[in-house]
Image (cartoon, grey):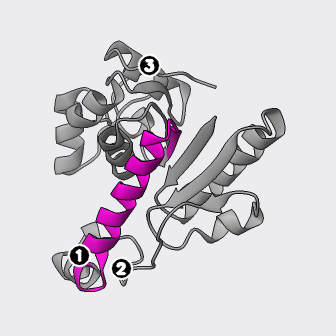
């Protein structure tokens, strides 16, 4: 069995490394590889037996190109489009070899896994229902994002939930029990560990 881990950021890389260490301890026969989508994936250096499956590159924005148009444009000029295209091709190649994809992060690796056609598992690190509510009720936050999330019924927006409900997605492991409970209400295969 082959497993390709996609992660998109320094914190996500660190979480992914912890997961891969546990997988290695439980099932050493699984061929493991990683593809850090953002940055160079330096956290993976602690696992020399886990190969980096494709190209990696630090962008001028450091992975925060959504913060402004200028940062995004600097990343495009720095090779973002070519890098992304090559990374998608790498994931698809692994999928054709029967690999399972472990995605750690947010929508970026989730979309790549979905586009690959492979079975995948998602570890959601960026979102929690505690941003909107707690066990007692709603928590108000100012801003348009809060309004959009409230109208959609979850911090995971409809298009994210659509990806998580795909037949390819075998399991979702969100940050906390409340988020798992809300996702399950939307028929997402969410589990609280």
Are circles 2 and 1 on residues that touch, CB within 8 Å?
Answer: yes
How would you rate the neighbour count of disc 2 (Cα within 10 Å): few for under 14, some for 14-19, many for 20 or more? Answer: some
**Quadrant for the C terminus in the image:** top right
Say which label, 2 or 1, has the lower sequence index.
Answer: 2
Say if 46 sits above or below 30 in the image.
below
In front here: 60 or 117? 117
Are circles 3 and 1 on residues that touch, CB within 8 Å?
Answer: no
In front here: 132 or 183? 183
Is 100 in the magenta?
yes
Q: Is mark 2 on a helix, strand or loop?
A: loop
In front here: 146 or 189? 189
Q: What element carries label 3?
A: loop
Residues in magenta, as a range: 76-103
Say which label, 3 or 1, has the lower sequence index.
Answer: 1
Residue beneath the point at 49% across and 41% down: 97
Say if 44 sits above or below 143 in the image.
below
**Quadrant for the N terminus in the image:** top right
**Whether residue 135 can be seen here:** no
How would you rate the neighbour count of disc 1 (Cα within 10 Å): few for under 14, some for 14-19, many for 20 or more? Answer: some
Provide residue 184's location: percent of width, then percent of height.
40, 16
The circle drawn on residue 137 is: none
Q: Mostly what secondary structure, the magenta segment?
A: helix
Say if 77 sits above or below 83 in the image.
below
Residue bearing mark 2: 61
Residue bearing mark 1: 72
Q: Is mark 1 on a helix, strand or loop?
A: helix
Say which label, 2 or 3, has the lower sequence index.
Answer: 2
Is 77 in the magenta?
yes
Q: Quadrant of residue 46?
A: bottom right
Residue bearing mark 3: 189
Q: Distance between the residues labelled 3 and 1?
A: 33 Å
Provide residue 169's location: percent of width, then percent of height.
41, 27
């Amino acid at each position: 069995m082959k497993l390709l881990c996609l992660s998109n950021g320094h914190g996500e890389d660190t979480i992914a490394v912890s997961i891969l260490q546990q997988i290695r301890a439980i099932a050493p026969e699984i061929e493991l590889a990683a593809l850090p989508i953002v940055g160079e994936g330096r956290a993976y250096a602690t696992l020399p037996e886990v190969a980096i499956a494709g190209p990696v590159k630090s962008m001028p924005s450091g992975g925060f190109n959504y913060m402004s148009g200028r940062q995004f444009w600097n990343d495009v000029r720095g090779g973002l489009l070519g890098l992304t295209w090559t990374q998608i091709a790498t994931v698809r190649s692994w999928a054709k070899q029967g690999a399972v994809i472990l995605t750690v992060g947010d929508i970026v690796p989730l979309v790549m896994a979905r586009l690959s056609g492979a079975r995948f598992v998602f570890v959601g690190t960026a979102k929690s229902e505690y941003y909107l509510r707690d066990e007692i009720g709603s928590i108000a936050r100012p801003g348009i994002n809060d309004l959009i999330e409230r109208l959609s019924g979850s911090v995971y927006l409809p298009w994210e939930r659509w990806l998580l409900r795909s037949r390819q997605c075998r399991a979702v492991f969100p940050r906390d029990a409340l988020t798992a409970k809300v996702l399950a209400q939307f028929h997402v295969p969410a589990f609280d560990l």
